[in-house]
Every structure is written in C-alpha cells, then in structure tokens.
C-alpha cells in the first residue's frame, strides 16, 4: 500500500541550513568537554539534559514521543547511535574538519549500499563521484604522513552507520514523528553510554583518556558546555529529521554539506583551529562527491508521488 507524502523543498532546505549552522557551532565545544570528562559520561549527561526538553516539546505540540513502529524506530536509533559514538569520540581526538569530513562520507556509503544490497544501477558519474570522495578522504586523513590508526578511521566508520540511519529515516520510519525518532535515539545513546561507563568502572579499565575515562565529579566546569550541547543538539537534530521528512533525501543532502563550511569557520573564529590546504581540498572533494551523488540520485516524479509503507 502506498500513501501520499507531499514534499516541501524550500522548507527542507532552510531547516537543513539552519540545523547545520547550529551543529557546526556547538560541536566545536566537544573538544573542550573532552579535556574534563570522558566520552561516555558526556553522552550520558547530554542525553539526561535533553530528556526534559523532549517532554516539553511534546507537550507544546511539536510531535509525539511514542513511535508508531517501535522495532523500526529502535533499529534506526541503533545505527545512528553507533555513528554518533564514533563521531563524538573522533571530535575529542582530532580537529572538527577531519571528523566532519569522515562523517560526510555517508552519501558514498548510501550509494554503495543501494548498489550492492538493493541492486540499484549506478552510472559512470556516480562511480566517478565515489572515486573523487575516496581521494578526498585520503587528503583529509593523510595516512602517509601520520600513519594509519583506528582513531583515524573512526569518523569514516561513523559515516557508514550514518548512511544507514539516513536511509532508514525515510524508508523505515515514514510517518513517524521527528520527536519520536529523536527521543528513541537519545534513549539509546544515554542507555548504551551508561552501560559502557558502568563497565569501565567495574572492570577498572579506566586509563584517564577521553575514550576510557572513569566517572568525573563534580562537572561544574563543563556544565555550561553540556547544556549548550544538549539544547543545541536537540534543536539541530530535530531540524535534520524534519528536513529529511519534508523532502527526498537526495535533495536535502546537498544542503547538509554546509556543515563542512560552518564547523571549521566557527572552529577558526572561536579557537583559532586551522585547516591545512590539502585538507581543505580533501573536504571540498568529499563535498563535491556527495553533491554529485545527490543530484544524480534524484528520483523521477512518479517515484516521488508515493512512499511504500
């Protein structure tokens, strides 16, 4: 059975641009948070701070918290949670431009998933886009200069899982409230990070590093940045979800790449965080690859008229 789903491209574009500017700003503060507390404590406290705001948003009519299809929403949430753990982990260990460049390899993975699993036929231009994106990844990460490490691959892995969650937002979760998707993801992020933090304490494996740091108390020094992250992320992610629901992903993804401009710009203005010329070229190539893939993936008018449920 199909159901009509009207697209609103202008509203989706403006929502995505605003959401990316906001996230590009607040994600710069994760490096400062990482100086005081660990990844898992940060994510758990962030989720706890978001919870009351989610309830208020539901009360004032911005959406419902209860999902229509729990299994689909939770499956999407697991994929996005893994992506965010990898991305937030990378943000505490490398410049934001590098972490974002890895995350934004997601359209390349979307294309490969569609080609290999869904047997979608891809033309030479999109194949070229994959090659261009790969060159961009190499330029940003510069494995020859710094050596290959698992930390270096974290943002790229985040891009893979983000690609799955992007597909799921519209294909698995059509008709779901943006608030229910956001609430499920925050619940998973908070719960999973809490389990890992507990495991670190029980096993006594804490070594003081960002990825394996024990519980730190008090947290007054980073409390303002945690609140900024919680409120800003809530608004930004809500905007992203709504944008993907208002128009087809191939249209919306083009505007998502504005984050590759916003985040390094704020990083430079606020913290003097620079980006080398080869990395700038790499980021540009990754963005170019994503835009080519998005433009060449536009569905026909017939395909856009309805969405299978």
Image (cartoon, helix red, strand yellow):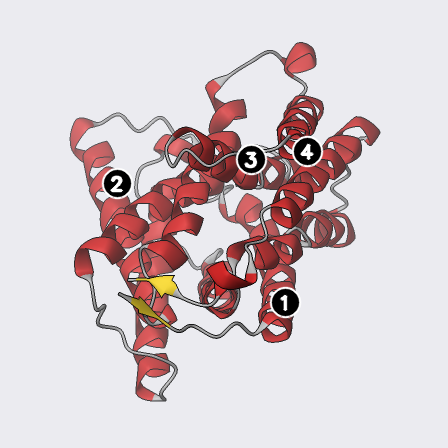
Identify the disc placed on residue 13. Answer: 1
Badge 3 crowding class, 10 Å Cα cut-off, few under 14, some 14 to 19, many 20 or more, is many
For the point 18% across and 27% down, which residue is it? 203
Q: Residue furthest front?
A: 302
Query: Which secondary structure, mark 3?
Result: helix
For the residues marked 2 and 1, what is the alpha-carbon distance in whole angstroms? 38 Å
Name above or below for residue 207 compared with residue 12: above
Of label 4 and label 3, which has the lower sequence position? 3
Q: Is residue 216 visible?
A: no
Of label 2 and label 3, which has the lower sequence position? 3
Labelled pair 2, 1 in contact (Cβ < 8 Å) = no
- Measuring from the top left, give residue 232's x and y in whole percent: 52, 66
Identify the disc placed on residue 108. Answer: 3
For the residues marked 2 and 3, what is the alpha-carbon distance in whole angstroms? 33 Å
Of label 1 and label 4, which has the lower sequence position? 1
Name above or below for residue 97 compared with residue 266: above
Badge 2 crowding class, 10 Å Cα cut-off, few under 14, some 14 to 19, many 20 or more, is many
For the point 70% across and 28% down, which residue is it? 132
- Measuring from the top left, give residue 178's x and y in whole percent: 38, 69
């Amino acid at each position: 059975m199909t159901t009509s789903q009207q697209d609103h491209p202008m509203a989706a574009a403006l929502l995505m641009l605003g959401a990316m500017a906001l996230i590009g700003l607040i994600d710069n503060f994760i490096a400062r948070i990482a100086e005081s507390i660990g990844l898992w404590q940060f994510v758990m406290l962030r989720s706890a701070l978001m919870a009351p705001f989610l309830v208020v948003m539901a009360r004032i009519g911005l959406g419902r918290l209860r999902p229509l299809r729990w299994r689909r929403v939770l499956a999407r949430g697991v994929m996005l949670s893994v992506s965010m753990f990898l991305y937030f982990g990378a943000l505490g260990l490398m410049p934001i431009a590098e972490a974002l460049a890895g995350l934004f390899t997601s359209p390349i993975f979307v294309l490969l998933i569609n080609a290999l699993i869904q047997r979608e036929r891809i033309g030479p231009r999109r194949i070229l886009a994959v090659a261009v994106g790969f060159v961009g990844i190499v330029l940003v990460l510069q494995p020859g200069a710094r050596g290959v490490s698992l930390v270096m691959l974290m943002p790229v892995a985040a891009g893979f899982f983000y690609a799955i969650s992007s597909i799921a937002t519209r294909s698995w979760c059509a008709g779901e409230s943006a608030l229910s998707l956001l609430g499920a993801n925050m619940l998973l992020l908070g719960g999973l990070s809490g389990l890992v933090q507990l495991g670190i304490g029980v096993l006594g494996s804490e070594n003081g590093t960002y990825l394996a740091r024990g519980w730190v108390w008090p947290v007054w020094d980073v409390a303002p940045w945690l609140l900024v992250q919680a409120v800003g992320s809530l608004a930004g992610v809500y905007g992203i979800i709504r944008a993907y629901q208002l128009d087809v992903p191939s249209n919306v993804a083009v505007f998502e790449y504005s984050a590759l401009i916003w985040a390094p710009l704020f990083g430079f203005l606020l913290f003097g965080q620079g980006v080398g010329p080869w990395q700038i070229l790499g980021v540009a190539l990754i963005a170019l690859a994503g835009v080519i893939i998005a433009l060449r993936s536009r569905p026909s008018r017939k395909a856009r008229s309805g969405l299978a449920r």
